[in-house]
Amino acid sequence: MSKTFETLPGTLDAVWQRLARGVADRRAPARHPVLATAGQNGGAAARVVVLRAADRANARIEVHTDTASGKIAEVTADPACALVVWDPRAQVQIRLTATASILSGADAAGRWARIPEGARTNYGGAPAPGTPLADPAEHRPGATFDRFAVLDLRIDAIETLHLGRDRHRRARFERADGFAGRWIAP
Amino acid sequence: MSKTFETLPGTLDAVWQRLARGVADRRAPARHPVLATAGQNGGAAARVVVLRAADRANARIEVHTDTASGKIAEVTADPACALVVWDPRAQVQIRLTATASILSGADAAGRWARIPEGARTNYGGAPAPGTPLADPAEHRPGATFDRFAVLDLRIDAIETLHLGRDRHRRARFERADGFAGRWIAP
């Protein structure tokens, strides 16, 4: 563990190990990244998401959402977004810069088929997300394929910050050079 | 605990209790919110920050940073930002929308005086954050008062999402009406 973050290749391996663990393990820190998007009236919006896939070969990750959610409107307006994972045990922060594509309908049917029925009720509740309610009980969860969307996130850059005992190490890896990586000042 | 999120006042109390705990307790979930800002080239930027103060009476929170950090450039260009805390034990997400003001120099001297000497080395390292390094050891931490900045975050809205056993409850509280709060669809 202690040597992991002392080299650029070790650091990049550690990032992808954590993302893979986030997909597989509900308790892993990378299970629940924060996804930040450009706000629709300026500024930024951010919320916790659930990591559903991590593909190192293509440097893509995946999140599922309701087509009526604010984040779909936000990435439609501006697909550039950011994700953050903080792993307190390893004392490492992972920051991803990504470009989002939205898959729905036929393009998302394969994913929908693999979602357990109970979990499908996250997509399609009524009324739509954000609608005022007199009481929370007015909301009815729904399972509606037409409201299911995959956010396919192409990673453009990965930044890590490791808070080491001897020093802090910050690294940046970019798609443009095949994620070769370089050290930068923390 | 189970009844806490069933009422709007209980929910708002729970938010401020968690923010206060984040200031006091290094292990509390609200110790390390993610701060999202508008990206300088569009999109969004996000990173973990350390919560340093929470003032319910004025609905303000505080974070400390290096004046040379990216987030200072970002909130200078657009002060509208967002913060997220996820409390896994309570199964509650707290989302804050805030407007940032930057305090430095004489306006930040009182805070600087209360920071232990060892912790001051987070402000003023050389070279500046983000500068390429051949090796992490090239970076020299520094304690430089002129590089210390307080991000004073005026909270404009608070949104909570509680994943309850019976149902999910989402609430929104806005400064405009004194944080009276209302339920909205999750």
Image: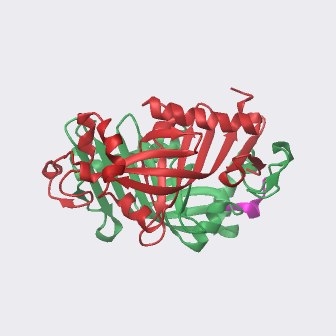
Chain colours: A red, B green
Q: Give the image location of residue B109, x and y in percent.
A: 68, 63
Q: Is residue A91 visible?
A: no
Give the side of residue B177 with respect to residue B104, left or right. Answer: left
Going 19% across and 46% down the picture, which residue do you hit? A141
Q: Give the image location of residue B31, x and y in percent.
A: 52, 44
Q: Give the image location of residue B40, x and y in percent.
A: 60, 68
Instruction: State whether residue B122 is above or below residue A22.
Output: below
User: Where are the magenta residues, as a range?
Assistant: B143-149
Instruction: State whether residue B5 is above or below residue A132.
Output: above
Q: Who is closer to the viewer here, A68 or B29?
A: A68
Give the side of residue B157 with respect to residue A179, left or right. Answer: left
Q: Give the image location of residue A91, x and y in percent.
A: 63, 36
The picture quadrant where one finds residue B132 is bottom right
Going 42% across and 47% down the picture, which residue do you hit? A48
Q: Who is closer to the viewer here, B179 or B58?
A: B179
Going 23% across and 42% down the picture, which residue do you hit? A121
Q: Who is closer to the viewer here, B71 or B102?
A: B71
> Is residue B81 on the magenta stretch?
no
Give the side of residue A21 with respect to residue A117, left or right. Answer: right
